Image (cartoon, rainbow, N blue to C red):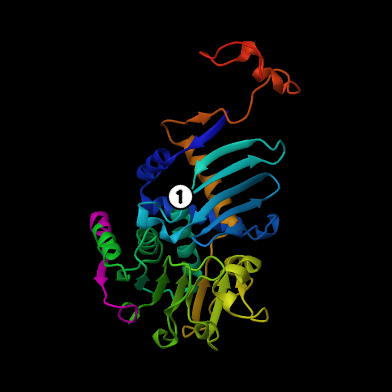
Amino acid sequence: MVDFIGIERVQELVARRGAARFIAELAAEIESDYLRWDSFDKSPRHATHSSVGVIELMPACDGRLYAFKYVNGHPKNTAVGLLTVTAFGVLADVQTGYPLLLSELTLTTALRTAATSALAAKHMARPDSRVMALIGNGAQSEFQTIAFHHMLGIREVRLYDTDRAATQKLERNLARLRLPGLVVVRCASTAAAVQGADIITTVTADKCNATIVTPEMIVPGVHLNAVGGDCPGKTELHREILLRSDARVVVEFEPQSRIEGEIQQLDASFGVTELAQVLSGARPARTSEKNVTIFDSVGFALEDFSALRYLMRIHHEERGGQAQIDLVPDLDDPKDLFALLAPEAAPVGARPGVLA
């Protein structure tokens, strides 16, 4: 039997801990894995693109555990009442190859993306950052707000989305959360939202080379958390922002970010720093309060590896339903797989007879 974590179980686990604590614990799990970066077998995700979206497989392995995530990105789905992103994942034992856990990762991906964003910002943004502009108020926006409020002490969040309904949704949800001391400001444009912001988070969904943030909007010392650009042909920042002399760009896994990140706009000679180097202290993300720091985040499989292991651990720690599924056969004789189809092994209610 294989452990199974569905949407309801994740809801239960988050509710028991609280979303802020869950995100902070997940961020610590992710950081611990980035700190053993060289232990992982890493590769860019495998993507199958179509005219309407992308389906991807994201593997990671540390020699003891193997994980993969299946995830899609279809920006037009919301027009027909479907999610833009859905995902599930598997955690397996390398020694036997047996799956240990099958889990939903749609909700969990939103949580781990916010956790990674806030983790990077703790090491990249100015310590006195208290105002964040949030450009794109869709499915990821609440998670980003919770993470930055809890982990960095953000006290004002400035909202803008071309879809007013998305901003209204975010305002409603933030009002229900009652995050202590948080001021929420609705803005009329991206330019208005970023004015006075210490951190600019972009989480837009359109699959295009957009210029959500332009050079004149950027002031020295600001930190950009660019989350929305995550596949070829999908960016959010004007390339001149990346090329600023005072800019320092951090990515998760350079080979993948060259294909999918903001740096796809630049040639291979453009230098970047990987997040693992920043977290370990091998390379500083910021050498001056005036540096413009950019976290060019596309989401990396190591973060899903961390999330699956974290989920499995708290799934066993927390009381409640611990569902399992019969995903792998349990045989008396491991060489006799056909025994599962023998007439005497037919499921209850099945008609006995000759197998065709």
Left or right of 214 on screen, residue 231: right
Q: Which residue is rendered at x = 39% and y = 51% of the image?
A: 82
Task: Locate the C terminus by quadrant.
Answer: top right
Residue nearest the viewer, comparing 356 with 167: 356
What amino acid is found at the position of numbered circle 1 in the picture? Thr
Disc 1: which residue = 106
- How packed mark 1 is, by other alpha carbons closer than 10 Å (few <14, some 14-19, many 20 or more), is some
Residue 339 higher or lower than 319, as above or below: above
Task: Report the label total.
Answer: 1
The stretch in magenta equals: 173-192
User: How far across and down, in percent of the image, does residue 349 sit?
Assistant: 51, 13
Residue 62 higher or lower than 113, as above or below: above
Instruction: Indicate the quadrant where residue 274 lies.
Output: bottom right
Is residue 287 visible from the viewing direction of this image? no
Q: Which residue is rendered at x = 64% and y = 69% of the image?
A: 254
Left or right of 241 on screen, residue 332: right
Q: Is residue 177 magenta?
A: yes
Instruction: Indicate the quadrant where residue 342 lies.
Output: top right
